[in-house]
């Protein structure tokens, strides 16, 4: 009986995912390293945050204020790497290995330059930005957040290059390569966090220093791993000096709308953080802990969007838009199952995970409510809200996706979040309810976009119409 059910399930999955570009077995072999990759990233992040939280009351708040500001810089250079990843995936799908290497080389140079500008600026002016954005926080929290940014800003420079190389491995389908890079950089980060935060008792600045050391070591390893003779990408040093105008245009055309979206999104999150800062320290610390714990759920979620980017990007590169749409729909189906499994595994573990942070007795109930409001709706709406957006971007539908994403943020987390949190005095629960509203809005609009066919542009639209005929 069990064997028969397993066989029927496998047949159904092969029917959904087998095509002339991929097989179900290939996708499964790509997905498992992606999931392990994300789990490792977020588990290390969780442990690192827990170390910060245990170093004293207000430490988690300082860490989150500094991290919210640094996310603005990350939004810009990571958006360029996302655009590059789409170009790389398209080139891989079309079989153009030269263009693929050119995209990697140009992206490395562009992202490193952008990262250097923002990294230096954040290191020099971070303390002043904290005081301007969060005037109501205590002097101790403001100082810790400023010290964090002063060191963390420098880590952005090596990480901007690491991020592109990491994205390149994912985009070509070498998820084992990206997993190896994750293991290296995050293992070093964990060891450095233990040294600087726990052993040397450096608190929040120690967390920033662990990022700096880990990212320097990580980028050196990433370059060596990319350039090794056995690497399937085949990069050589001359690929970093080539400049193809069309490749640059494609990266910029895809990257700019994503950059605008990411920057304005982080700006919206800063607004959210500003009205959270008016709550009690117990609630702000609880929100920081809940956010950190929630990263485990995002490990499962982001593994789905990452495989969507690779698969749909290669379908578009092979000029198969109908196949891209088919995979998008089926990845939503699979994503719901993955997220249900994540919730069933992780939510009952909430009390155990919470102990890592040594939260105050007053914050425990707030943490429970926040995690429940974030996790329980995910199997129903998260994949619809995010997988379609990812697939549409690979087809070049970046402007519409950006507008919808920012509108959803403004309506959900900012407007309704403020209403529930501040006006109705619901505390941090209001932020998480606003997040649910944001996901619902995105899911409805993106489904309408997918059905309409307007996500396709130019030649892709003609191909799709020809296939239907």
Image: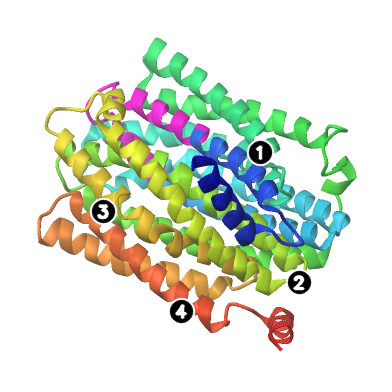
Q: Which residues are magenta?
A: 40-68
Mark 1 or 3, nearer chain start: 1
- Give the residue at x 73% y 71%: 320
Residue pictured at 57% horizontal, 82% vertical: 454
Which of the numbered marks, if any, corresponds to residue 319?
2
* Residue hosting label 4: 448
Residue 468 lies, in percent from the top left, at: 68, 85
For disc 3, the marked residue is 432
* Rendering quarter of residue 28: top right
Q: Tell me whether circle 1 and circle 4 mark residues in contact (CB < 8 Å).
A: no
Q: Earlier in the sequence, mark 1 or mark 2?
A: 1
Q: Residue furthest bottom?
A: 469
In this view, 175 is above or below 308: above
Q: Secondary structure at mark 4?
A: helix
Q: Label 4: few (<14), some or many (≥20) within 10 Å?
A: few
Q: CA distance from mark 2 to mark 4?
A: 23 Å
Give neighbour class at mark 3: few <14, some 14-19, many 20+ (Cα, 10 Å).
many
Q: Choose mark 1 or mark 4, whichever is in front.
A: 4
CA gap between label 1 and label 2 equals 26 Å
The residues bearing labels 3 and 4 have C-alpha atoms spaced at a distance of 25 Å
- Give coordinates of residue 13: x percent, y percent: 59, 55
**Marking on residue 354:** none
- In the picture, measured across the screen, residue 68 lies left or right of residue 162, that is left
Secondary structure at numbered mark 3: helix
Of residues 323 and 282, the one nearer the viewer is 323
Which circle, 2 or 3, is nearer the viewer? Answer: 2
* Magenta segment includes 60: yes
The residue identified by callout 1 is: 178
Mark closest to the chain's N terminus, 1 or 4 = 1
Q: Badge 1: few (under 14), some or many (20 or more) residues near its Cα, within 10 Å?
A: many
| Circle 1 SS class | helix
Disc 3 vs disc 4: Cβ atoms closer than 8 Å? no
């Amino acid at each position: 009986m069990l064997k028969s059910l397993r066989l029927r399930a496998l047949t159904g999955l092969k029917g959904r995912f087998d095509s002339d570009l991929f097989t179900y077995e290939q996708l499964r072999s790509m997905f498992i390293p992606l999931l392990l990759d994300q789990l490792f990233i977020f588990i290390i992040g969780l442990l690192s945050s827990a170390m910060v939280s245990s170093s004293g009351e207000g430490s988690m708040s300082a860490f989150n204020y500094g991290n919210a500001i640094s996310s603005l810089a990350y939004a810009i250079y990571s958006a360029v790497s996302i655009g590059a990843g789409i170009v790389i995936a398209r080139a891989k799908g079309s079989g153009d290995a030269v263009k693929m290497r050119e995209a990697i080389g140009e992206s490395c140079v562009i992202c490193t330059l952008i990262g250097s500008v923002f990294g230096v600026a954040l290191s020099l002016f971070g303390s002043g930005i904290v005081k301007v954005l969060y005037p109501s926080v205590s002097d101790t929290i403001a100082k810790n957040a400023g010290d964090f940014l002063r060191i963390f800003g420098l880590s952005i420079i090596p990480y901007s290059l690491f991020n592109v190389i990491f994205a390149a491995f994912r985009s070509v389908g070498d998820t084992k390569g990206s997993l190896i890079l994750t293991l290296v950089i995050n293992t070093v980060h964990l060891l450095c966090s233990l040294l600087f935060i726990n052993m040397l008792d450096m608190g929040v600045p120690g967390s920033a220093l662990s990022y700096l050391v880990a990212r320097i070591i990580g980028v050196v390893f990433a370059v060596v791993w990319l350039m090794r003779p056995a690497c399937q990408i085949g990069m050589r040093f001359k690929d970093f000096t080539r400049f193809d105008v069309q490749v640059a245009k494609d990266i910029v055309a895809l990257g700019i709308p994503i950059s605008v979206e990411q920057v304005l999104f982080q700006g919206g999150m800063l607004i959210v953080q500003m009205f959270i800062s008016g709550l009690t320290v117990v609630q702000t610390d609880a929100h920081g802990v809940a956010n950190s714990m929630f990263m485990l759920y995002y490990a499962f979620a982001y593994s789905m969007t990452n495989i969507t980017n690779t698969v749909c990007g290669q379908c578009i590169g092979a000029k198969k838009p109908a196949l891209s749409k088919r995979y998008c729909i089926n990845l939503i189906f699979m994503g719901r199952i993955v997220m249900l499994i994540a919730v069933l595994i992780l939510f009952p573990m909430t009390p155990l995970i919470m102990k890592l942070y040594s939260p105050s007795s007053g914050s425990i109930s707030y943490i429970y409510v926040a995690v429940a409001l974030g996790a329980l709706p995910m199997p129903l709406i998260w994949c619809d809200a995010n997988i379609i957006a990812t697939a549409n971007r690979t087809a070049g539908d970046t402007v519409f996706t950006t507008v919808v994403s920012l509108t959803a943020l403004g309506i959900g987390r900012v407007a309704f979040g403020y209403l529930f949190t501040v006006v109705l005095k619901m505390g941090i629960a209001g932020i998480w309810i606003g997040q649910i509203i944001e996901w619902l809005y995105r899911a409805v609009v993106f489904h309408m976009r997918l059905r309409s066919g307007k996500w396709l542009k130019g030649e892709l639209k003609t191909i799709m119409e020809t296939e239907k005929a």
